[in-house]
Amino acid sequence: MRLYEFETKALMLMEGIHVPRGVFTNNPMKVAEFVEKNGPSVVKAQILAGKRMEAGGIRFVKLPIQGELASEMLLDSTLYNEEVIGVRVEENIALQQEFYTSIYYNPTLKCVQISFSRTGGKTIENREEHSEQSIFHLQLPENQNIEWQLRNFILSIFGEPLPKLVAMLHSLHLFFLKFEFSFLEINPLGLTQTGEYIVLDVVGLLDSAALGRHPEIIIAPRISRRNFSSEEDFRNSIVNIEDARGVKSDFVYLGGDIATLAVGGFLSLAVVDYLIELGGKPFNYAEVKGTASSSRIVHILKTFLDNPNIKGLLIVGSTMGNLGLDSVANGIRNALREINPSYPIVLRVTGLGRELAQDISKGLQKLNMTVLRDETTIKQSVELIIQKAYGHSDQ
């Protein structure tokens, strides 16, 4: 099974592999917001076919309005006879150099093989200009010192060990093995201006049987216009993919230990910013719609909150008067009851639905939960969860 780029990068983030900061979405306004916050960005159509650049499926933008227009065009397009299910907007990374690497199982040699080239991007795809002799190969039999082999491999190519590149290839190899990929291609693998290696684009082919062995792999449904009686029905289904993975479009794993969930109001970015500013370590960035179903909210929270690394959870909402918010409240309550976390929870609810805070906490008296009201600001709420998670506010 071939994964979408945003799916593979989500797994890479979980494993601490450096990829550009970005989000998957079907909402052009979300793209504009991302560009406004992060500056020059890349808007990339999410399809399963390759060579998106040649088909116009990758757009470089500098202004929020450009991001909005580019995503609108891509979301209404078909590339290589394949429907665009969404876009991934990510920061545009300035590079010193581009490389190519792939990892795959070589059935002839019965081992994993890494291929590497000092040239990446579109150049390597042109076989007339890029000879096979410029691609280097390394076989990695089991039960051998992989890091030592990779170090010698890079040394033979560059004449120096390049420890950061060796560490990146080692991480990619472990990633390949852990999730049981059959093929993993990174093109380009970039060297940033600050000397770090980063995965700019990736193609991942997963052993379909691995899905059952790895519940942490959550994939978007594979759909086609041919399955729908009208274009409107298809577009509605496309939009719903934002939530179909269980963790809306705006979920990003950040590697810290304070989890967050924002319900409407576009609060999730502010929460993460405050966490970093005040010395907290955000576990994730996540936002859900105020109209999400109870079962979807349960799945959202179960997907990432049952994690031993989490020291605290902050749930915020400023539009909790939205139609259907009772489903969100029920979902949060049911998920927390099922997960039964031991870490502290801070719940801040404002707006028309603030009375629902007591409903959310009903039946959860055994949890370490603090319910806040309108008079408490977002910043104060973040300060409180940092204090409860770490024991003091300047951690």
Image (cartoon, rainbow, N blue to C red):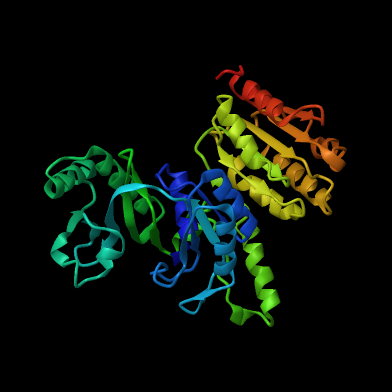
- Residue at position x 28%, y 62% in the image: 105
Give how far across and how far down residue 334 sits, in percent: 75, 45
Q: Quadrant of the C terminus?
A: top right
Q: Nearer the viewer, residue 270 or 116?
A: 270
Q: Please determine whether, in this image, residue 380 is positioned above or below residue 296.
A: above
Residue 315 position, x and y percent, is: 70, 37
Percent across and percent down for residue 348 are: 76, 33
Residue 125 shown left or right of residue 6 in the figure: left
Q: Residue at the spot x=52%, y=57% of the render?
A: 88
Q: Position of residue 324 (x, y in %)?
A: 82, 54
Residue 343 makes an appearance in the image: yes
Residue 370 lies, with reference to residue 305, above or below; the image says above
Q: Quadrant of residue 53?
A: bottom left
The image quadrant where one finds the N terminus is bottom left
Does residue 250 appear in this view?
no
Residue drawn at point x = 73 percent, y = 45 percent: 265
Residue in the foreground of this view, choosing between 140 and 122 = 122
**Left or right of 259 on screen, residue 203:** left
- Which residue is painted at 37% across and 51% down in the image? 199
Q: Give the mark count.
A: 0
**Residue 193 to residue 218: above or below:** above
- Residue 146: quarter of image: top left
